[in-house]
Amino acid sequence: MDHHTPLIATIVAGLSLAFVFGALAHRLKLSPLAGYLLAGVLIGPFTPGYVADQALAPQLAEIGVILLMFGVGLHFSPADLNAVRKIAIPGAIGQMTIVTLLGLGLALFMGWPVGAGVVFGLALSVASTVVVLRALQEKRLIETERGRIAVAWLIVEDLAMVLALVLLPALSGVLGGTAVTPAGAGSLLGFLGITSLWAVLGVTLAKVAAFILLMMIVGRRVIPWILHYVAHTGSRELFRLAVLAIALGVAFASAELFGVSFALGAFFAGMVLAESELSHQAARETLPLRDAFAVLFFVSVGMLFDPSILVREPLPIIATFLIIVVGNALAAFAIVRTFGYSLLTALTLAAALSQIGEFSFILAGLGVGLKLLPENGRDLILAGAILSICANPVLFVVLDRFAQRVRERDERARAESPRAKPEPPEPVLEPTSLRGHAVLVGHGRVGSLVADALRARGQPLIVIEESQDIVDRLRAQGIETISGNAAQPGILKGANLAGARWFISAIPNPFENGNLIEQARLANPSLDIVARAHSDAEVEHLEKFGASLVIMGEREIARGITDHILAQLDVDDAREAPLPG
């Protein structure tokens, strides 16, 4: 029997090593992305030992890109972007322009052509959405003005990079790389005798516009309709399959029919689906697969990195690293301060944007494929990314240490200069004054019913919820609500567990539930802890961590059905019983 299975071997080796080094990076307070990239280096062709399949890894990475961009589209909110557009749009464009010019200057100094310098500079100018969002969530900054500006800034950067990925193949010939004619346009342009750059660029933009128009008109009707139809079948498996089929199918069709990148196709599929009421469910259903293939994406990128460049070209690597960290930070800082925002806001944006990630890798791969960027340039980008991702948590630690001092300086500056832009006070998570109350984690389908019942009885209640939309709605109803993931450090302290009577975990994740129950039991040994589960094993797991009562949905459904039938049988028996006397 032939046991040569390169696909399985590549997936197993990639995910296993990514887990080991990702866990190690997390232990060292670094982003797990650094661990994933290192895992790729170890199974790449430039290090001794096992070498993963060099043809399969990029294809697996492409699936990761599709699902990653689909997720970006699902979370894209024009309303959030519009709220801070006056700083986010010019700020992101200005910062990317400055850093691109710095990268171009370094490339020209190293003797590269202008086209290579443009690609190199662009790759150094766009921050990793994954790294920034994770940092903002850990610091509980998402709901602050600083967090909203950072998220909108990222959206503008992502949109700019999507546009660059679309236009780069059309401009490749002019920039010194391989000339690429849009699919299906070669014969038409040749027949018309048109070979100019503007014609090729025009056809490319026309095809992209046609794709976007199709998605906005047809996709906005068809995609949500498909998902609503599948949702009404009641099959979670079919719903998950439908979401994946839409993401992958639209991405593939956009590339085949319109010559549009997989990334852009997946982004618009997610953006169209984001308008549906089922978008949050779609995001949850695809998250595990999206995370797995995103990990494989970073692993495959690490496989392309030649570690010997650290010895061969230390000075270019140091220069690249400084452009990424110092160049991005100073550009963002200067722009935010120019627009009149506080020193603390400027420093937060500077720290958040001083690293690069997924889009840089995609752009570098495209640049090498088009013969625009030398492979040495991709190695510099990868080295700079790994070093900047490792350095980013250190910058936030420094920022935290000086945050209070900076905040006091901002207050003095506002007092001295009335025209300075005021910054809304940040939410401080003070423990609730409630006592004898119920702490409810999660306000979804289960949690909302529990909350309604408790409020109807006048029971004091505090809710911990991760979705900002739900948080805003609950606060508008006068319900005390803590925004954030209950598993994050410090969140449970705000619920005053020591003074609470009940702790109700209505979230479906058994592992997160176990962690929360353990923390709640330590905070208040006499707390009445109620949780939900979906299997006997989950019930046993949660009881082991200290749950007072674990309710399994399937049991309660069976009990409700049985009680209804038995009640009907009791009525029948009463009717058939002979009358006395």
Image (cartoon, rainbow, N blue to C red):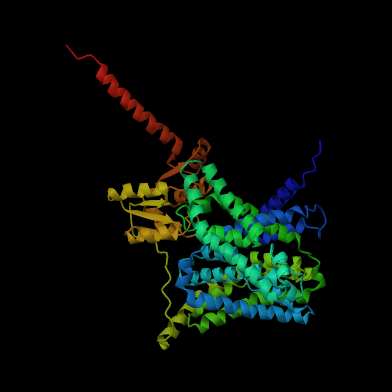
Left or right side of 451 for 313 = right
Question: Could one spot residue 154 in this view of the protein?
Answer: yes
Question: Could one spot residue 518 in this view of the protein?
Answer: no
- Residue 452 lies, with reference to residue 365, above or below; the image says above
Which residue is painted at 65% across and 67% down in the image? 165
Which residue is painted at 29% across and 19% down in the image? 573
Task: Give the residue at the far left of this rendering.
Answer: 581
Q: Quadrant of the C terminus?
A: top left
270 or 440: nearer the viewer: 270
Left or right side of 437 for 396 = right
Left or right side of 21 for 309 = right
Q: How many labels, in total? A: 0
395 or 83: nearer the viewer: 83
Which residue is painted at 64% across and 55% down in the image? 252
Which x, y percent locates residue 14? 71, 52
Which x, y percent locates residue 313? 80, 73
- Residue 347 lies, with reference to residue 293, above or below; the image says below
Which x, y percent locates residue 178? 77, 69
Q: Quadrant of the N terminus?
A: top right
Quarter of the figure with residue 561? top left
Quarter of the figure with residue 174? bottom right
498 or 548: nearer the viewer: 548
Task: Give the residue at the far bottom of this rendering.
Answer: 416
Which x, y percent locates residue 448? 38, 50
